[in-house]
Image (cartoon, grey):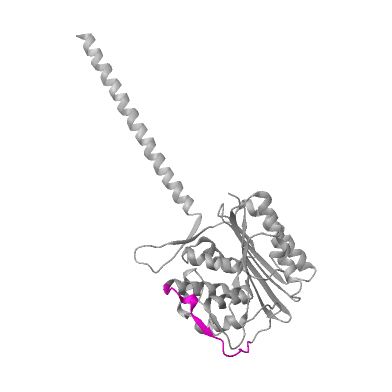
Amino acid sequence: MKLLKNKKSLAIIIVSMIASNALTYYSIKRNSANLEQENAISHDNNYDVTRLDGYKYVKPILYVDGKYEAENLSSIKQNVTNIIDNYKKIGILNSASMYIKEFKGNGWTGVNVDEKYMPGSLMKVPELIAYLKMNELKPGTLDRAISYDHKNDLDRHTNFNSKTIQVGNKYTIRELLTYMIKYSDNQATNLLNENIDKDIFGRVFTDLGLAIPDWTSGNYPISAKEYSVFMRALYNGSYLNKENSEIGAELLSQCDFNRGMIAGLPKGTKVAHKFGESGKVNEQHLSESAIIYINNSAYVLTVMTSGKDYKKLPEIIKEISANVYQYMKTNEVASI
């Protein structure tokens, strides 16, 4: 009988130990899960997520940014800072800014990223995006023909000229977009301006988190970081559908300006880019933004400059472009 009682006591002790261990295990698991959840929330707080409004049940992600600059890009940031400072010391450069967004690790960095510049023909990219959005909403828009009846007297002087449309001809919107992006033709741009849906054009800016430009004013100062959202939206295929994003990026790959970023890259590098010039006689602005493809991935590079001699500004963009590419290539930042 005593032995039976001892066995029962032992059984109770064992059951109690198992129960106690189980409670401890589940307590640890619960605390661990809570900790993981807290860490996830803390991790999410390190990012800014931009979503697209205007839908009833969904809110698509446009892009995600780290709140802080990527540490692995700090050395190229310092390198570019030194380039800018050197050109400022010798009086060639008044100011410059640079922004990099690499898509493998989703990191970014920049120099004077919030400094504003006059974008000039860089504004042709959001116009391109607006027309591609019009084509999504009304398929066949790109094939609509428009007559070019008279040449417009445009209140702007351009230093970098290429091909232009000819009076008396008809052009499809697709052809006009080609002239606007490939040759940066202001006559084609003006004709497109006359036929664009201004509401859709405005929404391109507000949807991407920017203020709507004043249509009657050529004054729209913008920073390198802000401008880069247009290139990022095209590469990510997050604003337009995949087909129209591809059309836009392919058109930008045909841009014939080759004195800036292109000149600093190895021959044959795949690039989708656009340049813009603006400013006055004593202060010229030259900027360029590009999606640069490398090792099955890509990065966006936007460089904005101002100086007294526009002939020197492409050389600065070229040097920055070459340095950034070499860093990306050597460190395999953009590789998969």
Answer above or below: position of 324 versus 227. above
Residue 176 picture quarter: bottom right
Q: Position of residue 200 (x, y in %)?
A: 46, 76
Q: Position of residue 168 (x, y in %)?
A: 59, 88
In the picture, measured across the screen, residue 80 lies left or right of residue 299, that is right
Give the dominant element type of the magenta stretch: helix, strand or loop: loop
Q: Which residues are magenta?
A: 137-154
Q: Report the number of numbered marks.
A: 0
Q: Residue at x 56, y 87 (%)?
A: 148
Residue at the far front: name it.
169
Inspect the magenta stretch and tell me whether residue 4 lies in it: no
In this view of the protein, which residue sits in the foreground, 103 or 305?
103
Is residue 143 shown to the viewer in this render? yes
Residue 54 picture quarter: bottom left
Answer above or below: position of 273 versus 193. above
In the picture, measured across the screen, residue 22 lies left or right of residue 203, that is left
Residue at the far left: name it.
1
Q: Residue at x 63, y 89 (%)?
A: 153
Answer above or below: position of 261 versus 15. below
Q: Residue at x 43, y 47 (%)?
A: 38
Q: Position of residue 37 (x, y in %)?
A: 41, 46
Q: Residue at x 50, y 56 (%)?
A: 47
- Quarter containing the N terminus: top left
Is residue 221 shown to the viewer in this render? no
Q: Position of residue 190 (x, y in %)?
A: 57, 83
In the picture, measured across the screen, residue 308 lies left or right of residue 277, that is right
In this view of the protein, which residue sits in the foreground, 222 or 104?
104
Residue at the far right: name it.
90
Inspect the magenta stretch and tell me whether residue 141 lies in it: yes
